[in-house]
Amino acid sequence: MGIAAAIKITPGLFIVYLLVTRRWRTAGVAVAAAASVTAATLLIAPEESVRYFPDLLWQTGRVGTPGAIANQALSGLLARTSSGAWWLAGSALMLVAGLWRARRAYEAGDETAAMTLVGLTGNLISPISWTHHLMFLPIAVPVLAGAGRSFRTLLAAGLYALCVLSPIWLDPGALTGVAGLIAGNSFTLTMVALVFLLP
């Protein structure tokens, strides 16, 4: 987790998850690994590192605009519905809900569900989550299916179909109004639902 957080900041949420589940030693090792890799990059590429951390890290717009359809983070949904100012509040709510549910899943002995919840939460609260970042969305399929109830198995099949069909790429003129809003934000809306409903 620490090395992943040093390479790409979003996995750092898994270190927070370790803290929330009171695994102090594992969290300490992850922080030490992240710090070591970051320090090594400072030695290997000092100019780039000095430019990145105080400046480029905070310029989230350089990777693309939040309103782009491929951004399925909460920021994308809010930018597309002209409510971008609510991103910070919405992200805070999703962070608390996601980590709380992940801790409950961990306490119930379901590490797979807990990690999936953290991954989905990370996708939602990130300033930009392109569709290829949503790797925890298909992982939620077996978590749902493994719950052993026919209704959840049906939901798992629906989630699988959503991942395969990818309705965000439908012709923008084909769907308008509420249907277009749901199709264009289908991954975001699904991740929000999963954070609250994943068993």
Image (cartoon, grey):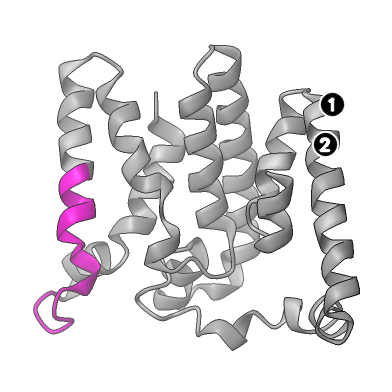
**Mark 1 residue type:** Arg
Callout 2: SS: helix
Q: Is residue 78 above or below residue 66?
A: above
Q: Toward the viewer: 140 or 125? A: 140
Judge left or right: residue 127 versus residue 71.
right
Label 1 packing within 10 angstroms: few (<14), some (14-19), many (20+)? few
Q: Quadrant of residue 51?
A: bottom right
Marking on residue 25: 1
**Mark 2 residue type:** Val
Measured as percent of width and height from the top left, residue 30 is found at: 78, 41
Callout 1: SS: helix
Q: Are marks 2 and 1 in contact (CB under 8 Å)?
A: yes
Identify which residue is drawn at 45% across, 71% down.
76
Residue that sits furthest to the left in the current view: 174
Q: Is residue 45 above or below residue 179?
A: below
Tell me how far mark 2 sits from mark 1, CA to CA. Answer: 6 Å
Q: Magenta segment, which residues?
A: 160-175
